[in-house]
Image: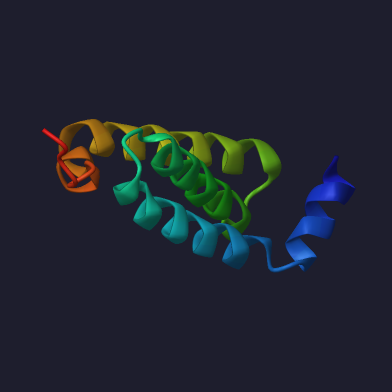
Amino acid sequence: MTDFLLWLSDWPAMEILFGLAIVLVLIDYFFPVDLPAYFGYLCFAGGVFFALPLTAVPSLLVALAVFAVLLLFHKVWFSKYLTNAFDKG
């Protein structure tokens, strides 16, 4: 498992995950469900996992905490702006 994580660290995994997170959160505006935003938050947390210079378990715990905070922010604040603006009623 450690070899696999080191192999992913050699790749630009962090940059790819951060870029994918931005794209997914931005396209969530056009969908009536929040699934792309949730995947974007998950990708952002994965990017944080690879960005931290810690071992696997502390990085995973911090990434899970970041994901939980993003979900909380989504419920409280982000959902106002990511709601589908095209009203058909």
Tell me the colour scheme of the image: rainbow
Q: Does residue 22 lie above or below 2 as drawn?
A: below
Which quarter of the figure has residue 47? bottom right
Q: Position of residue 66 (x, y in %)?
A: 42, 41
Total numbered circles: 0
Q: Residue at x 89, y 49 (%)?
A: 3
Q: Quadrant of the C terminus?
A: top left
Q: Position of residue 77 (x, y in %)?
A: 16, 40
Q: Is residue 29 visible?
A: yes
Q: Is residue 53 visible?
A: no
Q: Does 67 sit left or right of 87 as displayed?
A: right
Q: In the displayed image of the protein, which residue is found farthest to the right? A: 3
Q: Residue at x 23, y 31 (%)?
A: 75
Q: Which is more toward the observer, 64 or 31?
A: 31
Which quarter of the figure has residue 13? bottom right
Q: In the displayed image of the protein, which residue is found farthest to the front? A: 89
Q: Quadrant of the N terminus?
A: top right
Q: Residue at x 40, y 43 (%)?
A: 37
Q: In the displayed image of the protein, which residue is found farthest to the left? A: 89
Q: Position of residue 76 (x, y in %)?
A: 17, 33
Q: Does 82 sit left or right of 10 as displayed?
A: left
Q: Which is more toward the observer, 54 or 72?
A: 72
Q: Does 60 sit left or right of 34 as displayed?
A: right
Q: Position of residue 17 (x, y in %)?
A: 58, 57
